[in-house]
Amino acid sequence: MAWPGRLESVEEVDIETSRGAGAPVHRTTIWVVVGGGEVFVRSLNGEDGRWYRELTANPDAVLHVEEDAIPVRAVPAADPESVARATEGFNSKYGDSPYVDTMIRDEIAPTTVRLEPR
């Protein structure tokens, strides 16, 4: 899959995370957005979200997009420009969803993460 490819339009993806080598692997369904050619995710549960905590501890993860498994690396993106692009992406892509407001709350903005293919 070309990057970011279908991530601009696919409704949901799964992210596979773990705390590190030998730790259990977890798979969680999340929303993903593209802003300025960069791929962003954000934790609905803020810093309490398991996948976010695991991604913070071990930034190597796998993004499952339909039938593709894409190894990714997480980069913290809580800077104002990245947060704004991600928020714009959530509003644009999921604006028709009654749940979009839960993803653009100020209190979870610091959990914005950029994903890069590895």
Image (cartoon, grey):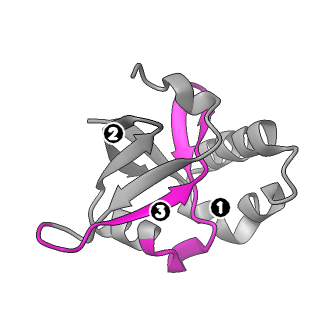
Q: Which residue is mark 2?
A: 69
Q: In screen coordinates, is 29 left or right of 64?
A: right
Q: Look at mark 1 in the image and give the residue it sits on.
A: 109
Can the viewer see residue 76 in this picture? no
Q: Is residue 63 left or right of residue 83?
A: left
- Dot 3: within a 10 Å radius of its alpha carbon, few (fewer than 14), some, or many (20 or more) residues? few
Residue 70 image position (x, y, % from top left): 33, 37
Say which quarter of the image contains residue 64: top left
The kind of residue tagged 2 is Ala
Disc 2 vs disc 1: which is toward the camera?
2
Identify the image quadrant of residue 57.
bottom left
Q: Earlier in the sequence, mark 2 or mark 1?
A: 2
Q: Is residue 116 magenta?
A: no
Residue 5 is situated, as x and y percent measured from the top left of the image, at 50, 22
Pinpoint residue 112: horizontal percent, then vertical percent: 56, 55
Q: Earlier in the sequence, mark 2 or mark 3?
A: 3
Q: Quadrant of the C terminus?
A: top left
x 52%, y 37%: residue:
39
Left or right: where does residue 6 sit relative to residue 103? Answer: left
Where's the N terminus, which quadrant? top left
Give the camera-side residue of 4 and 24.
24
Q: Secondary structure at mark 3?
A: strand
Query: Is tag 3's residue or tag 1's residue first in the polypeptide sequence?
Result: 3
- Image depth: mark 3 or mark 1 in front: 3
Tally the marks: 3
Residue designated by label 3: 28
Magenta span covers which residues? Answer: 21-50
Residue 47 is one of the magenta-drawn residues: yes
Q: Secondary structure at mark 2?
A: strand
- Where is residue 62? Give x, y as percent: 32, 48
Please rate how many residues cluster around mark 1, counting C-alpha atoms within 10 Å: few if below 14, some from 14 to 19, many from 20.
Answer: many
